[in-house]
Amino acid sequence: MSQNKQLFLTLYEPVHQSFERFCKARSYGQMPFKDLMQETLLIAYTKFDQLQEPDKFLYYLFGIASRIVSNHRRKVQYESLTEMDTVMTITQPAADRQAEKEQLYKALSMLPVEQREALILFEIVGFSVKEIAGFQQKTEDSIRQQLSRGRKKLLSLLSPNINSKGISYE
């Protein structure tokens, strides 16, 4: 048995029960706890050389398990949203979708250039705020401000009847 594998097992044995309890509690209702344990141990073993403080091995496992559960939850939410979009696309007539697209493009064209560009890059293309800040050579805070103002302006352009009734979303 390799020295790395032996050290891993030596560190794991005393924390096994605590780790198992943590996985049961953390994964409850989201995924099978044994799957969480196995995936965590696999990642922990493959990245074991990155562990700097062996006395914090249990917390190292907790961190990995928490990220796995979070990623799993995000993936499940994304899949359910994608399924909803598919259902909505199937049930909504093509003419209605085309009219909505045209209305959106018209409203986008009425926004200031930087707000329009930030919204398109963030919401449609999927770039991060940091990446957009690099493109536009601005701070991340100014990009967030552009996105916020652009969304508010877009909302007011796409739903003038709501704003005329005095309803505010701020």
Image: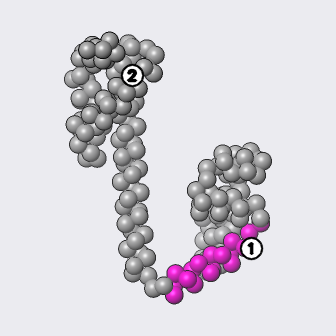
Write the residue at 26% across / 14% down. 1
Instruction: Tell me, yes or no, whether the two marked residues, 1 and 2, touch with CB atoms within 8 Å.
Output: no
Under circle 1, the secondary element is loop
27 sits to left or right of 99:
left
Q: Is residue 160 visible?
A: yes
Q: Residue at x 39, y 22 (%)?
A: 48
Q: As displayed, is residue 59 above or below residue 103?
A: above
* Residue 13 placement, left or right of 170: left
Going by the picture, which residue comes out furthest to the bottom? 95
> Is 103 contained in the magenta span?
yes
Q: Is residue 166 left or right of residue 17?
A: right
How packed is label 1: few (under 14 Cα within 10 Å), some, or many (20 or more)?
Answer: few
Task: From the image, tell me which residue sits under label 1.
Answer: 110
Q: Earlier in the sequence, mark 1 or mark 2?
A: 2
Question: How many C-alpha atoms fall within 10 Å of the one at disc 2: few (<14), some, or many (≥20)?
Answer: some
Q: Amino acid at mark 1?
A: Met
Residue 72 point in image, percent of width and height: 36, 46
Task: Indicate the position of residue 109 as horizontal and vertical percent values.
Answer: 72, 73
Q: Which mark is residue 48?
A: 2
The span from disc 1 to disc 2 (Cα, nearest Å) is: 54 Å
Quick check: 20 above or below 10?
below
Q: Quadrant of residue 4?
A: top left
The magenta stretch spans which residues?
95-112
Q: Position of residue 86 (x, y in %)?
A: 40, 71
Q: Secondary structure at mark 2?
A: helix
Residue at left offset 36%, top offset 54%: 76
Q: Main secondary structure of the magenta part?
A: helix
Q: Within the image, what quadrant is residue 87 found in? A: bottom left
Which of the 4 quarters of the picture holds residue 15?
Answer: top left
